[in-house]
Image (spheres, rainbow, N blue to C red):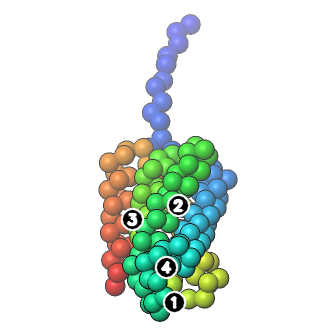
Amino acid sequence: MEQTYIEERPSQIVTMSVRQMLQVFLVGLLVGCVIWGVTFLFEKYILGAVLCKGQVSCSPAGQYASVFAAILSMAVGLAILVKLQIFRPLLIVIAAAVCLWGAFSIVSKLQWYEAMLFCAALYALAYATFAWIARVRLFSFSLLVTFVLTVIVRFILVA
């Protein structure tokens, strides 16, 4: 009897279960809460006290605090996504950070609970969206779509 071997080509999209997508969404929620909380605490109690020394309004403290919080939350998000074995976690984290860079300045005028919820929802949506895009096996295509989407979101946030 003659055996024939059929070579199967892998799918062009990496499969991602609903559970994994939900986990990515929850990591985004966590990262959004972390970035908001760290920015708030650093601006109010550490950098505000050092840089502003009693001034009513002090923007450098908020800017420095949001940069520190963004870097810290990127590290937390990346570590969790790697632990969950999500495909291309670094692309997801960097794209979400670039997209939402400066989002704290947008939500800073809201009440603290509204700002935290809004920030968490933005990061959860960004993480889930970029995780969905990162599933494409062809890295150059995934990177191109991520770049275009990032530019579009930045234009929307700046306008």
Return the residue at label 1.
109
The amino acid type of the residue labelled 3 equals Val
Q: Camera-side residue: 120 or 104?
A: 104
Front label number (4 vs 1)? 4
Return the residue at label 4.
48
For disc 4, the neighbor class at 10 Å (few under 14, some 14 to 19, many from 20) is: many
Single out the residue that lies furthest toward the right: 19
The amino acid type of the residue labelled 4 equals Gly
Which mark sits nearer the N-terminus, 4 or 1? 4
The secondary element bearing badge 2 is classed as: helix
Return the residue at label 2.
73
Q: What distance separates the C-alpha of mark 4 from that of mark 1?
A: 17 Å
In the rendering, at what x and y percent does residue 137 appear?
42, 44
Front label number (3 vs 2)? 2
Return the residue at label 3.
98
Front label number (2 vs 4)? 4
Q: What distance separates the C-alpha of mark 3 from that of mark 2?
A: 13 Å
The amino acid type of the residue labelled 1 equals Lys
For disc 2, the neighbor class at 10 Å (few under 14, some 14 to 19, many from 20) is: many
The residue drawn where x is 53% and y is 61% is 73
The secondary element bearing badge 1 is classed as: loop
Give the label on residue 53, or none: none
Which mark sits nearer the N-terminus, 2 or 1? 2
The residue drawn where x is 44% and y is 83% is 52
The secondary element bearing badge 4 is classed as: helix
For disc 1, the neighbor class at 10 Å (few under 14, some 14 to 19, many from 20) is: few
Residue 101 figure quarter? bottom left
Q: What distance separates the C-alpha of mark 2 from that of mark 1?
A: 21 Å
For disc 3, the neighbor class at 10 Å (few under 14, some 14 to 19, many from 20) is: some
In the rendering, at what x and y percent does residue 113 appear?
65, 82
Q: Camera-side residue: 31 or 62?
A: 62
Which mark sits nearer the N-terminus, 4 or 3? 4
